[in-house]
Image: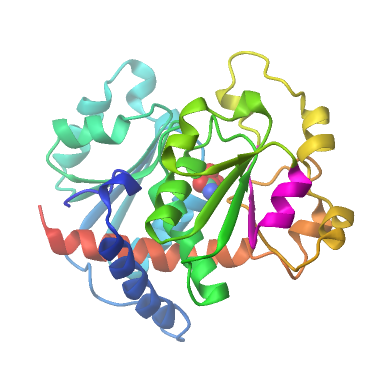
Amino acid sequence: TRHLLGIKDLNLSDIEQIFETADNFKTVLNRPIKKVPSLRDVTIANIFFENSTRTRLSFELAEKRLSADVVNFSASSSSVSKGETLVDTVNNILAMKVDMVVMRHPYAGAGVFLAKHVKAQIVNAGDGAHEHPTQALLDAFSIRERYGEVAGKKVVIVGDILHSRVALSNILCLKQLGAEVMVCGPTTLIPKYIRSLGVKVEHNLINALNWCDVANMLRIQLERQDIKYFPSQREYTMLYGLNKQILDSLDKEITIMHPGPINRGVEITSDVADSKQSIILDQVENGVAIRMAVLYLLAGQGA
Ligand code: CP
């Protein structure tokens, strides 16, 4: 595939190839000289129509480690505010001889739309509540790093499944890799179709945590909720917040993940997020190697 629009476009061997390539880049990133010349003739535009800390910096670092030329575009400080369309914006960037576009956008399907209408290779850095493929790849890669393999592992994704692109991409990626997946949260935040993806549904946090090897704790996406959802933030924390007391009461040592940004004290307490069972910062570290792998492999598919 010329683009990376979603995990749904990848098969098992694509994912394994990305992981093996990321293994090599992780070795490079641990050397004193972290840079390789692989994308020396490639120009990449990172265009972000929605806020980001991790994904934007991680893609930019990955591109620079691969020796690509990089330009960054943030919609809030651009001529989008003067009425310029998405296609016009991107075609104007491409006229400056840009090869690849990494895009985050608040609308589901924005990457698919763009791939149909412009010539560049498109990498989806998160489109609305739809997909966030590189997040799912770095999450699964981090589980593989922790346990040696993903197949057979039990992973629960806790929280706002309804509004989460991280949840959908994680489910698709983990199922391809042979993990067992459960989602846990209030009925109002779990979409009805989710069982059709082959995942278990559990509404009780303690039951879910006792079942799993890995718990991926998601944030409540208040920015995507246009009506008042039950439960309120305080009720959510009481029912689904993970604290040290709960963690220590479990029979086995589970692994704690979070894609960030964390709302400390809401979905997870600081003592859990910062505990030795947490691999949250390993996820962030692995994000650079995964994005290097994705960009490197896509560049090989050419324009
Ligand atoms: N995990 C993630 O996508 O974080 P950002 O929104 O900060 O990029």
User: In this orientation, does residue 175 appear?
Assistant: yes
Q: Position of residue 231 (x, y in %)?
A: 75, 24
Q: Position of residue 180 (x, y in %)?
A: 52, 56
Residue sitting nearer the eye, 93 or 137: 137
| Residue at x-position 51% and y-position 26% | 192
The boundaries of the magenta stretch are: 205-219
The answer to whether residue 70 is above or below residue 25 is above
| Residue at x-position 15% and y-position 35% | 118
Q: Name the image quarter holding residue 161.
A: top right
Q: Name the image quarter holding residue 278.
A: bottom right
Residue sitting nearer the eye, 274 or 167: 167
Q: Position of residue 28 (x, y in %)?
A: 39, 81
Q: Is 116 included in the stretch rendered in magenta?
A: no
Residue sitting nearer the eye, 154 or 111: 154
The answer to whether residue 157 is above or below residue 288 is above
| Residue at x-position 43% and y-position 40% | 197
